[in-house]
Image (cartoon, rainbow, N blue to C red):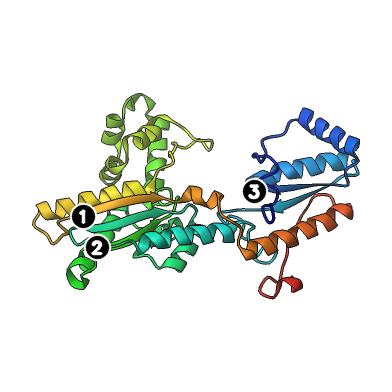
Amino acid sequence: FLNQAGSDLLPAMPLSRLSNRILTQVVKLCERLCLVGLVFLCGPSELSEVAKIAEHFSKSQVPTAVVAVLHSLSGWVQLPEWIPANLGFDSARSVLSEAAGNIALSKESIQRDIYHFVACGSPTLTLEVAMQIHPTLCFIGVDVAQRRLALQAIIDEICDVIVARHHEHGLHSGVVMISDDFFEQLVQMRALRDEVHRLRTERPADIRSEEDANMLLPDDLAEFFALLPADVRGALVFRTDFNGLPMLKPQEAEREVGNMVARCLRERGQRGERTVEAFSQQPHSLRHLAWSPMPTPLDCLLGYALGHVAGVLATGGQNGYVASVRGMAGPGTAW
């Protein structure tokens, strides 16, 4: 069980919302066991609950110190001065780069063009893997939003690259990487959600079906709305998220974009334009692999250092602190 952080010995579960009854039980347990410190290995979304426990301990004058160790496989925590690297991110990057790299090196087919549409998860993780394997194209939400790209413009760009590689360079395969926030960050998607929200607020009686909503939308948004899968259209029209906006259901961006590219290439051939006659798209979701890697040497060293910091904070009675290390550009002994 070396370098497994006890994950094979102890059960792991998300830290849910804590009630006063549960907080009281935690206090009694710490007092009964005479605990000096309570260390939480948690993600950024769970940190608020850990802060609630620390605050409750402070008000109740419990001597047990509450210390948090942040981890994020997706690299969501970005505080360069205090947390230069997320625990678990390097291990996730390593296994995803290996899997995506093997896909990129798969044998070409001489009968048809085969393109692999790969999803690795968060934009940070997707970009890191892309820098390792050098895919044909890579689309992340932040870049899509900054360039203010429309969905059809992105599909056309992918098709243009595929056609040019086929006819001008004799290349018949490639990898297109897409992050999970691809659809969410599209300018059209933001405008569509705002417009549907306005229609549902001002004209609720006129929206009884997806067809009604499509007729009330402006032409550009109606065209974009028609490109979306049926379940996504239904959720946008009839369901609401926790912010009060039309709900955007999670989508397999790699599968949807791959289908759109294949359809666009077929339509180009029907119009007599230059295209790829035999095209096959293969979607790959690698997200689950990030949860099952062997830890890399960097993560082992980082976890070891963070554990020591957490132990020092706990024994020193420093309640409500987050363990961190700095100076990671140097050797581990100098962190």
Label 2 sits on what residue type? Answer: Ile
Q: In which image quadrant can residue 330 be found? A: bottom right
Q: Circle 1 — which element?
A: strand
Label 3 sits on what residue type? Answer: Gly
Q: Of callouts 2 and 1, which one flags the residue occurring earlier in the amino acid sequence?
A: 2
User: Which residue is label 3 attached to?
Assistant: 43
Q: Nearer the viewer, mark 2 or mark 1?
A: 1
Which percent across, then down, holds residue 266? 16, 51
**Residue 66 in view (yes/no):** yes
Residue at horizontal 23 percent and vertical 64 percent from the top:
172
Closest to the observer, 72 or 297: 297
**Residue 148 in view (yes/no):** no
Q: Nearer the viewer, mark 3 or mark 1?
A: 1
- Circle 3 crowding by C-alpha within 10 Å: few under 14, some 14–19, many from 20: many
The image shows residue 79, relative to residue 219, as above or below, that is below
The residue sitting at the bottom extreme is 330
User: Which residue is label 2 attached to?
Assistant: 162
Numbered label attached to residue 279: 1
Residue at horizontal 66 percent and vertical 44 percent from the top:
46
